[in-house]
Image: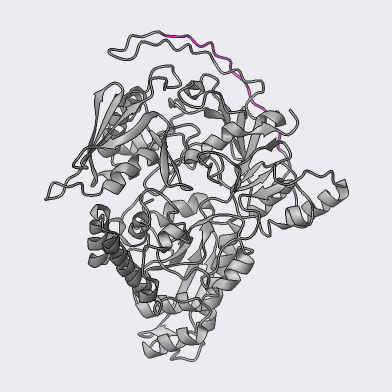
Amino acid sequence: MRKSILFLNLLVVLGLVAACGPAPTPEVVKETVVVEKEVVVTKEVEKVVEKVVEVTPTVAPVAPGAALPRNETLYFNGFQWGSVVCWNPYNPNCNCAMAIADGGNNASARVTMFETPYMYNFLDGKVYPLLADGDYAWNADMTEITFKLKKAAHWSDGTPVTADDVAYTYASHLKYSTTNGAAYKDYIETIEAKDPQTVVVKAKLDANGKAVNPLVVAGYLSNIYVVQKAWTQTLEARANGDATKFKEDVAEDVVYSGPYHKFFADDTKVVLVRDDNYWGQDASMWGKLPPPKYLAHTIFKDNAAGSVALAKGEVDVSQQFNSNIQLLWLNYGLPISTYLPDAPYMIAASLPTAYFNLKSYGLDNVAVRKAIAMAVDYDTIIANAMTNQSPTFKQVPRSIMNPTAGEQALYDHDAVKDLQWVGNDVEGAKKLLDDAGIKDTDGDGWRELNGKKLSYKALCPNGWSDWQAAIEIVAAAGQKIGIDITTEFPEWSVYQTVFTDAKVNNYDIFMVWSNGDGPTNPWGRARQLMSSEFAGTSGNWNGNWGGYVNPRVDEILKLIPGETDPAKLKEYYTELTKIYLTDVPSFSLMYRPQLFHTVNETVWTNFPHEGDGTTPPVPPMDLINGYSIAGLYNLTLVNP
């Protein structure tokens, strides 16, 4: 615990809470509890390691929906916005944030309920085995990856995790055209079970017999869940072969391998409960169970409500933007801290980005796009919207790279400096529009293109206060240069269904996150920002939501993964940066942590922080993403 816990006058604490806003009123939920007797079924599995796993039901000391014991519960905020839709690991639209988050855009899959073969750690750029046993190995030609599975790993029904499960998962993604299937079908040919414990991942090959993209092939191992083959077949039978039904099944009966599973979920909160039979307590993995019995997430209406709960000690781990976070310990002495002790308090790795919908009138004109981007006051976004929890674009000039030293070294800064802008260049933006002949011709204060007024809506999810403040500043920039931009803030449950579907997307300017640090980045981020493979698609959680198409970008994206010459890679990344800053299909509004990581040590302590001495270092990914889940096992109670 880095900051001492002080006994504060209750009036001071209440004053802080009142200043932040009203606290949410607890809701009492009455539930009928059905106790089922579990029958242990022994079945013979051919050639599988002979090991008997005794399955006993996890005993729940409280009824679902009732108050949870505080010293057994780790509370979160900032992940779950709106009610859970489903628990189906084949569906990225479940809105089940505490349990499901995998895919090509996730540097670190969430591994609370479902698990991946490996866990990525962005602090050292390495992967560590989870379901896998030891490191994976490429063959000499780098066309196949082989890895083993831990003999101890088993599913929640007691059956072992096998190579057949890994293979059948990928085959199902392809068969039912899931988002993950679409993301990997061009890069992975097959995944095969060599024997019950051995997995072989075969890359798709180009005309020269080389892997099309070894980066993506390796990234699959830490990005995509393994789903039980037997349960998948149950799901298939229930869907009767219908791909839509397969993906939209609620999956309340899903079998899982992780340390937690569903305990309760409604429109007020989501609670996972520990599986006391979790295989990870074996000496080959963690050697023990994670200390929290429950992982709970109250569904707050907005960031302000979540910040109040954090200040009151009702949230232990905060993955949301908390305005002026440092005041909570500097002014009020609260036992609250961030991964870094000083500004920017977090490790910036992501670039929240405003996308232009290139189907909207006028936004297919690069002069309009660049003028809007040039006029935005980014310093105000960082100072006010982010309360300095981000480096500025003066400190880290814009490109397609995040601020980490490794990525910044991958392009030629001098070669693109004339294309970079720091923002608030209203006069420069006006001149750009004037020179393009885009002027106010009828005297109403708004510019027209070919006689039609330029008028747009800018959107981001409601309750995401830092994004909302940023979008308001984008709208203000439009006003200053004669382009009418107004803001709207739909609920996330609606927002996510629109921007991911090119057929229905009528948003003009809209915010989406970017890939942070990960095993395939910055290539993965460049692909996300500009690859035409995603343009015009539905169910698109992969990228290029504005519909930008550039054949040269696609060509470079194909060249990078197989390139090993550092000088050539720098040349490619410099060219991609030039294209992005010239065409401006989207523009980043700030640098942002991959995940916000703020903790309250009133109840739990020993959270990850800079210099905490952990080896390997536990990344600030909120104890549930990738290798950060290692930090969950380090937690102790302040008052045992």
Q: Main secondary structure of the magenta part?
A: loop
Query: Is 338 placed above or below 297 here?
Result: below
**Position of residue 599 in the picture relative to residue 356 (left or right):** right
The residue drawn where x is 52% and y is 73% is 394
Quadrant (top left, top right, bottom left, bottom right) of the C terminus: top right
Task: Judge from the rendering whether residue 306 lies leftward or rightward of residue 430; answer left or right.
Answer: right
| Residue 83 part of the magenta-drawn span | no
Q: Quadrant of residue 243?
A: top left
Q: Residue at x 35, y 68 (%)?
A: 577
Residue 238, relative to residue 391: is it above or below? above
What is the quadrant of residue 236 in the picture?
Answer: top left
Viewer-closest of 542 and 284? 284
Give me the residue at 50% from left, 76% from top. 422
Place of residue 438 in the rendered image (x, y in percent of width and height, measured from the top left): 39, 86
Quadrant showing the N terminus: top right
Q: Where residue 195 sits: x, y (%)? A: 25, 22
Start-end of magenta stretch: 27-41
Q: Residue at x 23, y 57 (%)?
A: 558
